Image (cartoon, grey):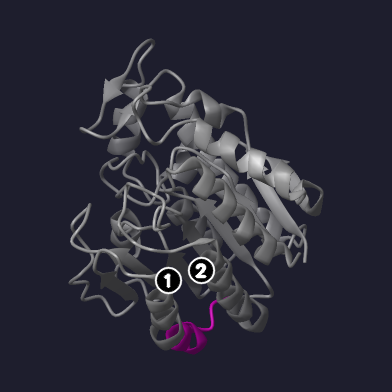
Amino acid sequence: MTTGYISHPDFLQHEMGSYHPECPGRLSAIEDQMILSRIDDFVTRIDAPLATEEQIALVHDQSMIQFLKENSPKAGYFAIDGDTSMNPHSYQAALRAAGACLAAVDAVMQGQVSNVFCAVRPPGHHAEPHRAMGFCLFNSIAIAAKYALEHYGLQRVALIDFDVHHGNGTEAAFRDDPRVLMCSFFQHPFYPYSGENSSASNMLNIPVPAYTKGLDIRQIVSDLWMPRLEEFAPECIFISAGFDAHREDELGQLGLVEADYAWMTKQILQIARKYSNNRIISSLEGGYHLSALGRSVVAHIKELAEI
């Protein structure tokens, strides 16, 4: 199994203040753990290109794109909401985060690699078609999924979201689209206070209470996710890979550990082998305890690369 790893130095330039948990050190922590675990030689590194605004518009309204572009500050910060802001480098970083996921689609569809992990910032799954929010500017994984459907003519793609927060932006982008099956679990009640009443038949969103442990999540994946994924038979799988459900992460209150992320990845790989010609695009979302994040990403990549 050949696994791509897509990132870029631009992602380190985006920051929202020294206090902010969504910080450049997140990517440094991942790189450090990759060196410590000696898996760097087992991945194919690819530089993230910049997405075009036309590609961003696959998911986001032109007015939203223009709003972010026009308010990109020359110095300091521009506040989007209480948790989300841009510095002078943020807009380009967001374009490159989407570009990473688009390049991942090209790489797996053209057979350059079997699957890809995109180490990107800012994250994206809270960004809705009409607005940025929740640390997120553009919804990179949704843009990539839409690109796979439109550019490569795929008929069925699955979106897996195992972040501690509900991927409200991804749901908004694909609600009632029969070409897309979204499977997620998330802590509830919790930011962004959505997802528990999803009525769309293509949304399998499972709210779980605080302090839910990994064994309970594994049961949800086995009993609920896997039968739906088998029935859906996706031609490509996209993962919003948030690692803030880890028990050491203070931004959530769930109880997962590295072994749970490895196990979930292995289950997703089973579906990919059967229906998707191994094609998986995974993109970093949350994860704010730096050590836990690095260890969890390495566990995820090891399973993707089968090492």
Q: Residues within 10 Å of mark 1 (few under 14, many from 20)?
A: many
Classify the position of the C terminus by image quarter. bottom right
Q: Pick whichever, 105 or 293, lies toward us.
A: 293
Give the spatial CA distance, label 2 vs label 1.
6 Å
Q: Vertical placement of 18 versus 53: above or below?
A: above
Q: Vertical placement of 80 versus 157: above or below?
A: above
Q: Is residue 43 visible?
A: yes
Local SS, label 1: helix
Residue 209, how many percent across, how many down? 24, 68
> Which disc is residue 214 wearing?
1
Q: Which residue is mark 2?
A: 260
Q: Residue 7 falls in which quadrant of the image?
A: top right
Residues under numbered marks 2 and 1 in contact, where contact means CB atoms less than 8 Å apart: yes
Residue 100, how many percent across, how many down? 59, 44
The magenta region covers: 226-235
Q: Residues within 10 Å of mark 2 (few under 14, many from 20)?
A: many
Local SS, label 2: helix
The amino acid type found where label 2 is placed reads Asp
